[in-house]
Image (cartoon, helix red, strand yellow):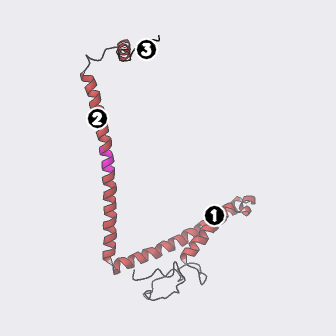
Amino acid sequence: MAAPLGGMFSGQPPGHPGDSRGQPSLLQAAPGPPRTSNSTLVDELESSFEACFASLVSQDYVNGTDQEEIRTGVDQCIQKFLDIARQTECFFLQKRLQLSVQKPEQVIKEDVSELRNELQRKDALVQKHLTKLRHWQQVLEDISVQHKKPAEIPQGSLAYLEQASANIPAPMKQT
């Protein structure tokens, strides 16, 4: 990739080589509330998620009596998380756009790979359905064979039991 992810997974400083086009990195301040100097979007996303979770299990909210205050606090935490998630999504979409402009063949390779995977999945599904179809065709064939031989199959439940008992071997006599 021509432009690294701007310190998303390491402590790379902002403005590193390959990011001189003015595109925001994960360490640069995006529109919205100011960030701390070493904070990345991923770090903020994680901390805002933790804040959402903490607000839901916090003793302050459990013991609180004002439901409107609790609801407002939880809504604010969730809204902050959603805002940072949108910023993170925008960052990755910008990087994806840069990649598609700089290396269009890479995007085509990914699309071809996805299409091949989809074809394999659909081929497996077709084979599964063909197997089921063969099974049910065999069941129908067996049923039609039974209906073609009505003279061999005695009518009525008593006749059926007589025929079934005729096939059972007689018990051995004890001496």
Q: Can residue 119 be seen in this snapshot?
A: yes
Q: Where is residue 86 in the image (x, y as percent from the top left)?
A: 50, 71
Instruction: Say whether disc 2 or disc 1 marks the residue closer to the N-terminus.
Output: 1
Specify the quadrant of the image occupied by residue 147. Answer: top left
Residue 138 is tagged as 2
Instruction: Say whether disc 2 or disc 3 marks the residue closer to the N-terminus.
Output: 2
Q: Decide: few, some or many residues near mark 1? Use Cα within 10 Å; few <14, some 14-19, many ≥20.
A: some
Which amino acid, mark 1? Phe
Question: Gap between marks 2 and 3, in whole Å?
Answer: 39 Å
Camera-nearest residue between 62 and 150: 150
Residue 172 is tagged as 3
Q: Where is residue 167 in the image (x, y as percent from the top left)?
A: 35, 17
Specify the quadrant of the image occupied by residue 57. Answer: bottom right
Q: In this view, does 97 lie above or below 18?
A: above
Question: Gap between marks 2 and 1, in whole Å?
Answer: 56 Å
Residue 156 is tagged as none
The answer to whether 1 appears left or right of 28 in the picture is left
Q: Nearer the viewer, mark 1 or mark 3?
A: 3
Residue 53 is tagged as 1
Question: Gap between marks 1 and 3, in whole Å?
Answer: 75 Å
Instruction: Say whether disc 1 or disc 3 marks the residue closer to the N-terminus.
Output: 1
Q: Decide: few, some or many residues near mark 2? Use Cα within 10 Å; few <14, some 14-19, many ≥20.
A: few
The number of numbered badges drawn on the structure is 3
Which amino acid, mark 3? Met
Q: Give the range drawn in magenta.
A: 125-130
Q: Residue at x 31, y 38 (%)?
A: 135
Q: Position of residue 94 (x, y in %)?
A: 43, 77
Asked which secondary structure carries label 3, the reply is: loop
Which amino acid, mark 2? Gln
